[in-house]
Image (cartoon, grey):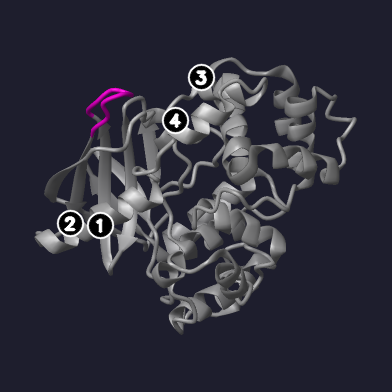
Amino acid sequence: MGGYLSMKLKQVVVAAIEPTAPFNFDATFFKPAHFASGDNFWERGVRWQTFRWQGKNLGVVFRNAGIVEKPKIAVEIWNGEKLVKRFVEEFVREIVYRYNLDFGLTEFYREFSRDKVLGPAIKRIYGMRPGHQDSLYEYLIIGVVLQNCTVRRSIQMMQALFESYGTLLEFDDKELWCFWEPGSLKSVSEEDLRGLKLGYRAKFIKRIDDQFGRAEIDEKKLRQSDRETQMRELLKLYGVGPATVWYLLFDVFHQYDFFNHVSPWEQKIYSKVFFDRPVTDLVPVEKLLKYFEKFGKYRQLAVHYVWEDLWWQHRKKPIPWLTREVRT
């Protein structure tokens, strides 16, 4: 390592968020299936996360200050300079959106708590919210480095990108990487990116960054659009196809009733979890999608709950069949 930017954050503003109840802090702020991207750290009751937001590098600490039925989050926002009140208020609203802290789970629970597969998952991670900490741009970059390789290799590529273009932030006795500004790779060539051993992914990252640099897409405006408009605009982004749009609509734009894609990896997991079939005896994708229709407007949220619960169980006590799949 060497030559990267670093910043020690000394100014801190404390805010409070009261999510809608019920709320599960740990299951919301930590997703065991996610790879370690170097910009966050979690321990029970606390999450450290960096954000590149409105041109500023922020180090944020989320602390659980409530209980499931009466939730409260203490939020520390660290920066290199004093933050004005309006900035803090807008950033807190952004946090609420990204982590779905104002989402109501009552109807979802009422309808499906007795489902034979989903019901136990709801009980174990009761109050969990779907959500993602990254902006659309950051989500796309992470998606590129996750393509067609092992988790270890993805971590290496993400680290190389952070060391070359990100900033190492020191705050609250932690050192975590922060993303670069979208569009800031304008003077970086595809060859430069290939020099980081990104392979074909260099082309994707360069094209995506160029599109954001030209402001071809407005994430906040797109949040207010209908699903068809969101799909149409997202498909204009380089390398984004129907499969990628499916993930974006759920993780970034919080569409819960749209489900039209199952990857080969997910097909194995869903076959085992929902139909108790060996991972070598796959349930056809069409049959899986038809089965998920029973969850109606919550079909994506329902499957997400079962997925997250599986990985939490695996974290607490390794599941043999899942361990074998992760290693292959």
| Callout 1–callout 2 Cβ contact below 8 Å | yes
Amino acid type shown at disc 1: Phe
- Disc 1 vs disc 3: Cβ atoms closer than 8 Å? no
Question: Relative to 294, does residue 69 appear above or below in the rendering?
Answer: above
Q: Which of labels 3 and 2 is toward the front?
A: 3
Secondary element under disc 1, as helix, strand or loop, is helix
Q: Which amino acid does label 3 sit on?
A: Lys
Q: Was residue 67 drawn as part of the magenta stretch in this picture?
A: yes
Residue 104 x/y as whole percent: 40, 39
Q: Mark 1 points at which residue?
A: 91
Circle on res. 88: 2
Residue 50 drawn at (x, y percent): 33, 51
Q: In this view, does 317 lie above or below 227?
A: above
Of 67 and 182, the residue lying toward us? 67
Q: Residue 27 carries which label?
A: 4
Left or right of 128: which side holds 50?
Answer: left
Q: Which of 204 and 120 is in front in this view?
A: 120
Kindly give the residue lying farthest to the top in the view shown: 317
